Every structure is written in structure tokens, then in C-alpha cells.
Image (cartoon, rainbow, N blue to C red):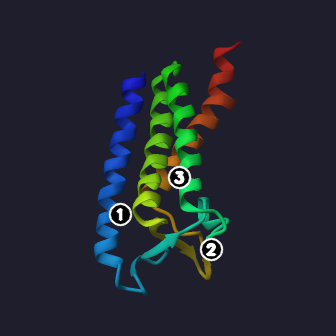
């Protein structure tokens, strides 16, 4: 299982890196971004905080945020070594890959490059990137496994 999780993590890291390179090139100089669908824009935003821009504005130094993410990643790698299903290994791999993808940005730029803007009317979800999406999907899978499927294994 660890090999599967690490392969998923590597795929997420590479895909995140490629999409961020594209976003930096295509959206870097365009402060208006581009409309893709009636509910989806692509616009480059620098996230200096944690998830969804919380504690942004330089309240916490980038190296501290990166250190916390790396510590969480280490815990996840230990958990991955004990994973007992493909689903859990894949989910942990998604979270690890997303965390590492964003840590790379913090070391390179001092902030995370976000570029996906989903909205409905005047309400905009905070901008995010592929790494954030992988983390979110991985966490949802882990929650479903723990709350619904994991309980069945212990009966």
C-alpha cells in the first residue's frame, strides 16, 4: 500500500507543478483572468495564508507554514505505511501530494499560487489549485472510510 500512496502523491505533485507553471505563464500578467464557464474563472491569486487564505497578509511566515505542512506530511507517511486498503492509500497519497505541492510554492515564492475561481452569482469560493483539490478529495475519502466503511470492518 505505501508504494501505491507514494505513486499517487508523486502524480499529484507533478500535475500540480505543471498546472501552476501554466497558470503562472498564462495568467501571471492578466489581472482579470479568463472566464471558462459561467461559474468558473481562471485567475492567478497568491495565497500567503493557510487554507482558503486564512491568516493571510503575512501574519504567519511562509517557512512556518511550510514546516507545519512538512510535519503533517511526515505523520501521513507513517500512516500510509499502516494503510490497510487501496482506498486509504490513495486518499493519503492525495493529501501528501497536495501538501508537498503547496510547500514547494511556499519555498519558491513565499506564497501558494491559486488560480481556480468557482463562483455562483456574486459568491466566490476562495481561489484554489490542483493541490488543494487533491487534499480536499483525499480528506473526504478518509472521512468516508473512517465513518462509514471503517466501522463495518470492526463489526
- Tell me which corner region of the image, top left, top right, bottom left or bottom right, holds residue 4: top left
User: What is the C-alpha distance between the residues marked 3 and 2?
Assistant: 16 Å
User: What is the C-alpha distance between the residues marked 1 and 2?
Assistant: 21 Å
Residue 12, horizontal then vertical, whole percent:
37, 46
Closer to the eye: label 1 or 2: 2
- Residue at image location 32% in from the left, 52% down from the top: 15
Which mark, residue 66?
A: 3
Q: If the image is split into quadrants, where does the C terminus sit? A: top right
Pointer 2: what residue? 57
Tag 3 and tag 2, C-beta contact below 8 Å? no
User: What is the C-alpha distance between the residues marked 3 and 1?
Assistant: 18 Å
Pointer 1: what residue? 20
Q: Secondary structure at mark 1?
A: helix
The correct choice, above or below, for 144 with respect to 99 in the image is above
Q: Secondary structure at mark 3?
A: helix
Q: How many neighbours does mark 3 have within 10 angstroms: few (below 14), some (14-19), or many (20 or more)?
A: many
Q: Is 86 positioned to the left or the right of 151 in the image?
A: left
Amino acid at each position: 500500500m505505501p508504494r501505491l500512496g507514494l505513486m499517487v502523491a508523486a502524480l499529484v505533485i507533478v500535475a500540480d507543478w505543471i498546472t501552476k507553471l501554466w497558470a503562472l505563464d498564462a495568467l501571471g500578467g492578466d489581472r482579470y483572468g479568463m472566464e471558462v464557464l459561467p461559474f468558473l474563472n481562471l485567475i492567478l491569486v497568491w495565497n500567503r495564508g493557510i487554507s482558503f487564505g486564512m491568516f493571510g497578509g503575512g501574519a504567519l511566515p511562509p517557512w512556518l507554514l511550510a514546516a507545519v505542512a512538512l510535519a503533517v506530511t511526515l505523520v501521513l507517511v507513517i500512516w500510509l505505511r499502516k494503510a490497510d486498503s487501496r482506498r486509504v492509500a490513495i486518499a493519503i497519497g492525495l493529501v501528501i501530494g497536495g501538501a508537498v505541492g503547496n510547500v514547494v510554492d511556499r519555498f519558491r515564492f513565499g506564497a501558494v499560487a491559486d488560480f481556480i475561481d468557482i463562483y455562483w452569482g456574486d459568491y466566490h469560493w476562495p481561489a484554489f489549485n490542483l493541490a488543494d483539490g487533491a487534499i480536499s478529495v483525499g480528506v473526504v475519502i478518509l472521512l468516508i472510510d473512517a465513518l462509514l466503511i471503517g466501522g463495518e470492518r470492526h463489526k
